[in-house]
Amino acid sequence: MNICFTTNNAHKLKEVKEIVGDSIELLSLSDIGFSGDIPETHETLEENSLEKAQYIFDRYHTPVFSDDSGLEVLALDGRPGVHTAYYSGSRDAVANMSKVLDELKGESNRKARFRAVMTYIDQEGRINQFEGIVDGQIADDMSGADGFGYDPIFIPDGYDQTFAELSSEIKNTISHRKRALEKLVQFIKSSL
Ligand code: IMP
């Protein structure tokens, strides 16, 4: 079975391929002949994730799934949330993390979570969404060199190091993406 994953990010595609295994053949956007940007115009992860999958389904009529994820900080009323990628106004990871750290200065409640929402649209156009969450804390400073995005300031519950200090094996076992994807893969396999 072929399913398009709405990404051209090689790192994400590899990560997702490892979790999905051989039973499903994953196609990237370029594999199906799409180039350009898919609009993300909404204020929730659920709506943006659906928008991306629907955009591709409407044009290619192929089974497709998309993901949208973000960091939600409790003391910041869930921000940066859907604005995670461009929180400081740019995609610059250090600027984005600095903004969160500045906003949390003097705040003792450091609780946060990464949340991923995956949307799967099957051949018939039926829509299902799957959520994955990893709970944790925002560190006082940035530490660690691995990973991407906000990894240097996120300490997952049960660990005392940031995602950027922990091995990718550990991160990929407990991440929000992994948790959402596991539900999605289970759903697809059970409906084959
Ligand atoms: P996306 O929807 O998966 O592209 O994620 C939006 C933004 O959330 C990214 O640009 C990253 O800044 C951040 N993000 C998502 N997942 C992670 C993660 O696993 N670690 C660190 N940052 C992440």
Image (tube, rainbow, N blue to C red):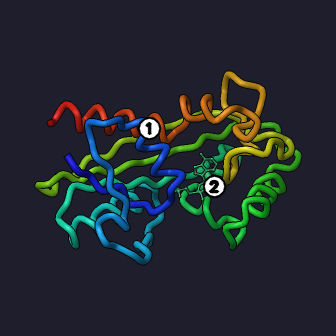
Is the residue 56 above or below the residue 191 in the image? below
Coordinates of residue 183 in the picture (x, y in percent):
35, 34
Please tell me in which quadrant of the rendered image residue 4 appears: bottom left
Amino acid carrying label 1: it is: Glu
* Residue found 27% across the figure and 42% down from its top: 24
Q: Residues within 10 Å of mark 1 (few under 14, many from 20)?
A: few
Q: Which residue is mark 1?
A: 18
What residue is shown at x 44% (from left), y 70% (from top)?
40
Residue located at (80% from left, 49% from top): 104
Tell me which residue sits at (50%, 59%) in the image. Answer: 9
- 83 on left or right of 116: right
Q: Is residue 108 left or right of residue 182?
A: right
Neighbours of disc 2 within 10 Å: few (<14), some (14-19), many (20+): some
Q: Is mark 2 within 8 Å of ligand 1?
A: no
Q: What kind of element bears circle 1?
A: helix
Q: Place residue 188 in its image quadrant.
A: top left
Q: Pinpoint residue 92: horizontal percent, then vertical percent.
A: 72, 66
In the depicted view, which residue is nearer to us: 174 or 46? 174
Q: Earlier in the sequence, mark 1 or mark 2?
A: 1
Tag 2 residue: 79
Q: Which mark is residue 67?
A: none
State which quarter of the image contains the C terminus.
top left
Camera-side residue: 112 or 127?
A: 127
- For residue 21, above or below residue 88: above
Where residue 82 sits: x, y (%)?
Answer: 54, 59
Q: Residue furthest bottom?
A: 36
The kind of residue on which mark 2 rests is Arg
Q: Nearer the viewer, mark 1 or mark 2?
A: 1
| Numbered-mark total | 2
Q: Is residue 178 left or right of residue 53?
A: right
